[in-house]
Image (cartoon, helix red, strand yellow):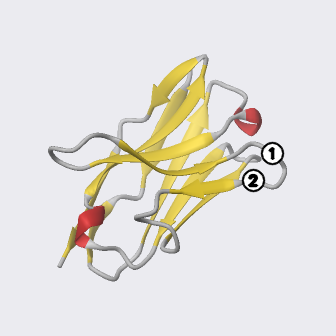
Amino acid sequence: QVQLVESGGGLVDAGGSLRLSCAASGFHFSVATMNWYRQAPGKERELVAAIDNNNVGTTDYADAVRGRFTISRDDANNTVCLQMNNLKPEDTAVYYCNVYYFTDHWGQGTQVTVTS
C-alpha cells in the first residue's frame, strides 16, 4: 500500500532553515506528482509546493513561500524534499507529504514551529 513518511520538522528561530523529507513507497513514484501541504491551527490545509513527474520536474509554489521554499525529488530513492529558508512565524504548521494515486494519500505530518 502507499506509504508516505515525513521527517525533518522541528523548532527554529525566524530567519532560520529546515529541510523536510518524505520517503515514499507502494506506488510508481517516478510518474507521480508530489506535493507538500501544511495546516496551521484553526486553518484549512493548504498546498505549499508541488513537483511534476516529467523530466524537467516542473514546480509550483504558494505565493506565501515562493522564493523561500524549494521542492525537489530524487526518483532513484523515492524521496521528495522541501528546503525551507528564511522561515517566518506564519510558516508554523504541520507539514504533510501528499500524492494523488487513485485517491489522495497523506503522511502522518511533521511539526514545524518558527519562533519570533
Cα separation, mark 2 vs mark 1, equals 5 Å
Q: Quadrant of residue 78?
A: top right
Tell me residue 83's x, y (percent).
51, 66
Return the residue at label 1: 54
Going by the image, does 3 lie left or right of 73?
A: left
Residue 93 horizontal/vertical position (percent):
27, 54
Q: Tag 1, which secondary structure?
A: loop
Q: Which amino acid, by three-letter code, is at mark 2?
A: Gly
Q: Which residue is mark 2?
A: 57
* Location of residue 88 by image quarter: bottom left
Determine the residue positioned at 70% across, 47% down. 77
Q: Residue furthest bottom?
A: 15
Q: Is residue 98 above or below residue 95?
A: above
Q: Nearer the viewer, residue 47 or 109?
A: 47
**Residue 106, position in %: x, y?**
44, 31
Q: Is residue 11 left or right of residue 28?
A: left
Q: Kindly identify which numbered label has been placed on residue 7.
A: none
Residue drawn at (50%, 35%), measured in percent from left and top?
4
**Which amino acid, mark 1?**
Asn
Q: Residue at x 81, y 55 (%)?
A: 56
In the image: residue 89, left or right of residue 85: left
User: In terms of image quadrants, where is residue 59?
Assistant: bottom right
User: Which residue sits furthest front?
Assistant: 63
| Residues at circles 2 and 1 in contact by the CB criterion of under 8 Å | yes
Say left or right for 68 vs 75: left
Instruction: Name the quadrant of the N terminus.
Output: top right
Quarter placement of the C terminus: bottom left
Q: Dot 2 lies on which element?
A: loop
How many callouts does the rendering have? 2
Q: Residues within 10 Å of mark 1 (few under 14, many from 20)?
A: few
| Residue located 58% across and 49% down the image | 50
Relative to 23, does residue 31 appear above or below in the rendering?
above
